[in-house]
Amino acid sequence: MKLWSWLKNKFKKSGIVAVIRLEGVISTGGRFGGGINDQSLSPLIEKAFELGRLKAVALIVNSPGGSPSQSSLIAARIIRLSKKKDIPVLAFCEDVAASGGYWLACSANEIYADENSIIGSIGVISAGFGFHEFISKQGVERRVYTSGEEKSMLDPFKPEKKDEVVRLRAIQKGIHENFKNFVTERRSEKITGKKIFTGEVWEAARAKDLGLIDGIGHLETVITEKFGEDVKLKKLERKRGLFSKFGKASIDSIFDTIYEKIVYSKFRL
């Protein structure tokens, strides 16, 4: 009888909280372990919401942003499953949840962050270089053949055209409006009347005052407070392919890492 009681207490859990890590630059690449995209994450997200005795899904967010389309796809998947299964989602921000990273965090019902986390950057950016003067001085002739007058829009090897910049800004404005509408819908009255859509970033305390996050706290502490000490954290991770350490996969991973370091550097103090 004592043995049975011991076993019962040992394996007794009030429920499970699935933990998914969303870390890296958000892009259609990064298929070999780095970066974030809907294709690589969808099996993990689907699996999380299928777990038995599930109390909640926790998202560990550490991303400086990236593709708005991939941000939207991932967030939509999480929200859809959360509503379908009637399971709450909590986001926990680490170093940075900016731009697309904050988009992902807003797929959660509640957002928490470390006191040193960088939050926000609700905006859209496009960056590039102009090489037309350089190649001209080097005696290089640029040859481009297109079917369609605007097919080579913003070609870095041609002089910048004002009408092309106007079109780019129109695209950026549309995406920015989508971003603002999503944040407004998800954070509702918590951000009403506050100036948060300028692309600015804030540390956690200011982000909380502005309604961007719900509190300052860490995964284990918050989960224990909400669901009790007996709840079990089940961490789910993406599987790497057999050949992910070799050949092109390895090279892609190196470039992914370099690119991520460049993007993250904007938010490091």
Image (spheres, helix red, strand yellow):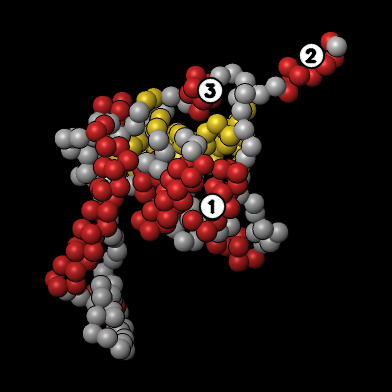
- Asked where in the image residue 249 lies, by quadrant, the reply is bottom right
- Asked where in the image residue 184 lies, by quadrant, the reply is top left
Q: Which of marks 3 and 1 is nearer the N terminus?
A: 1
Asked if the residue at tag 1 contacts the one at tag 3, i.e. Cβ–Cβ closer than 8 Å, the answer is: no
> Pointer 3: what residue?
227
Marks 1/2: CA distance? 40 Å
Image position of 248 (left or right of 106): right
Q: Where is residue 211 in the image (x, y as percent from the top left)?
A: 28, 31
Image position of 121 (left or right of 27): left
Amino acid at pointer 1? Leu
> Pointer 1: what residue?
41
Q: Which residue is drawn at 40% across and 35% down?
A: 109
Instruction: Name the residue nearer the viewer: 73 or 80.
Output: 80
Instruction: Name the residue nearer the viewer: 95 or 211.
Output: 211
Image position of 135 (left or right of 104): left
Asked if the residue at tag 2 contacts the one at tag 1, i.e. Cβ–Cβ closer than 8 Å, the answer is: no
> Pointer 2: what residue?
5
